[in-house]
């Protein structure tokens, strides 16, 4: 069952990645230039992908990865995300994303 969930998630990420790759690249250029609008748009894409792949509401992939890091597959996902985000956002990106989202977004 875990293998099927992992495969479903991976396929979802790949399909969403193909759909959002160009908007993501273009928005990233503007976000690195300091555009708050572009950064917020990227964050919204992240939340949309997490919602599509996991059925969540108002949770980013980074925050979800940290929240579920006790599960091996999410632990590895968190490590990859933290590695990719380190040059732009420093260490412990997923942990900080979860902490911020838990404080700012009330899910219940």
Image (cartoon, rainbow, N blue to C red):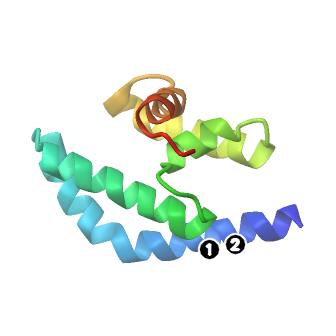
- Up the image or down, 37 lies above or below 22; here it is above
Which residue occupies the foreground of this view, 2 or 52? 52
Name, please, the residue furthest toward the top.
91
Which residue occupies the foreground of this view, 18 or 9? 9
Say which quadrant the C terminus sits in.
top right
Check whether the beta carbons of the residues at disc 2 and disc 1 lie within 8 A of each other.
Answer: yes
What residue is pinned by disc 2? 8
> Label 2: how many residues lie within 10 Å, few (<14), some (14-19) or many (20+)?
some
Q: Report the residue at 44% width, 69% height from top.
A: 17
Whole-number angstrom distance, CA of label 2 to CA of label 1: 5 Å
Which residue occupies the foreground of this view, 48 or 82? 48
Asked if residue 4 lies left or right of residue 100, the reply is: right
SS for callout 1: helix
Asked if residue 69 lies left or right of residue 72, the reply is: left
What residue is pinned by disc 1? 11
In percent of width and height, residue 86 lies at 42, 30
In percent of width and height, residue 63 lies at 54, 40
Asked if residue 29 lies left or right of residue 2, the reply is: left
């Amino acid at each position: 069952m875990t293998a099927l969930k992992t495969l479903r998630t991976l396929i979802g990420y790949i399909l969403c990645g193909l759909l959002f790759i160009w908007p993501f690249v273009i928005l990233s250029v503007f976000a690195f230039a300091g555009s708050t609008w572009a950064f917020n748009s990227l964050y919204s894409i992240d939340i949309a992908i997490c919602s599509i792949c996991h059925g969540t509401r108002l949770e980013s992939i980074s925050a979800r990865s940290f929240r579920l890091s006790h599960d091996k597959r999410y632990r590895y996902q968190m490590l990859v995300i933290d590695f990719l985000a380190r040059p732009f956002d420093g260490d412990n990106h997923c942990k900080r994303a979860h902490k911020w989202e838990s404080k700012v977004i009330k899910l219940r």
